[in-house]
Amino acid sequence: MRGPVKSSRCGILIRRDFLKLTVKLFIAVAGILSVPFIFSLRPFRVQRKKIQYFFLSYLDELPRRDIKRFEINLEQQDSRSAEQNLKNINIYVVKRTDGWIALSPVCTHLGCIVNWNRAKKEFICPCHGGRYSMDGEVIGGPPPLPLRKLPLKIEDGRVFVGLKV
């Protein structure tokens, strides 16, 4: 009667050793395969875009009061091919007592393009009703931040606006 008991214990030990070996092997393979994933989570260096100045208009075309919208045609060269893409960007120039400021028309809530309402004297986002003052500050609605101010540079009667491209 003791003989069969020993053989079943031996079988249990073999199965237990096999199970331990299988678990160890699984953990080792999972560890090796997770190395590339862990390295992909590491933040990589993002090259910051430099500000490039683009011709906006001549000084006498800037608004004497209120706001004027300008459209800039940018030529961007695709790095993967020799093709050039034309990109139109709208910019609002606001006349203030101390000079002019340039504002991006992109709403800081969801990226919609805001419109200037002359009657209300404010920028209004058509997507969710965000409202901005003449200086780009948030008046109401969901936008978390004011409109982005863009650098202006005036040289020899020509006005340039700085964009990160």
Image: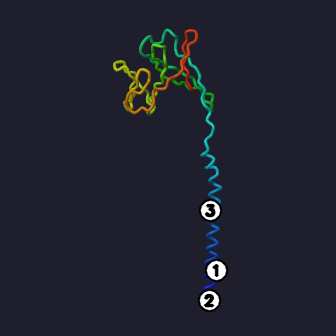
Relative horizontal placement of residue 61, taking residue 122 as reference (left or right) = right
The label shown at residue 10 is 1
Q: Is residue 10 above or below residue 32?
A: below
Disc 3 and disc 1 in contact, CB within 8 angstroms: no
Gap between marks 2 and 1 measured at Cα: 13 Å
Q: From what the image shows, is residue 101 above or below residue 140?
A: above
Residue at the image point whose x is 63% and y is 84% from the top: 6
- Residue at (44, 27) in percent of width and height: 113
SS for dot 2: helix
Q: Residues within 10 Å of mark 3 (few under 14, many from 20)?
A: few
Residue at (44%, 10%) from the top-left corner? 64
Question: Which amino acid, by three-letter code, is at mark 1?
Answer: Cys
Query: The disc labelled 3 sits on which kind of residue?
Result: Phe
> Which image quarter holds the C terminus?
top right
Residue 8 image-quadrant placement? bottom right
Which quadrant would residue 156 be assigned to in this image? top right
| Residue 3 placement (x, y as % from top left) | 63, 88
Tag 3 near tag 2, CB within 8 Å: no
Query: At numbered mark 1, what does the secondary structure look like: helix, strand or loop?
Result: helix
Residue 86 in percent (x, y) is at: 54, 24
Q: Closer to the N terminus: mark 3 or mark 1?
A: 1
Label 3, on which residue?
26
Disc 2 target residue = 2
**How many residues crowd mark 2 within 10 Å: few (<14), some (14–19), many (20+)?**
few
Quadrant in the picture for the N terminus = bottom right
Q: CA distance from mark 3 to mark 1?
A: 24 Å
Counting residues from the start of the chain, the first of labels 2 and 1 encountered is 2
Mark 3 or 2, which is nearer the eye? 2
Query: Is 31 displayed left or right of 95 in the figure?
Result: right
Q: Is residue 80 above or below residue 37?
A: above
Q: Residues within 10 Å of mark 1 (few under 14, many from 20)?
A: few
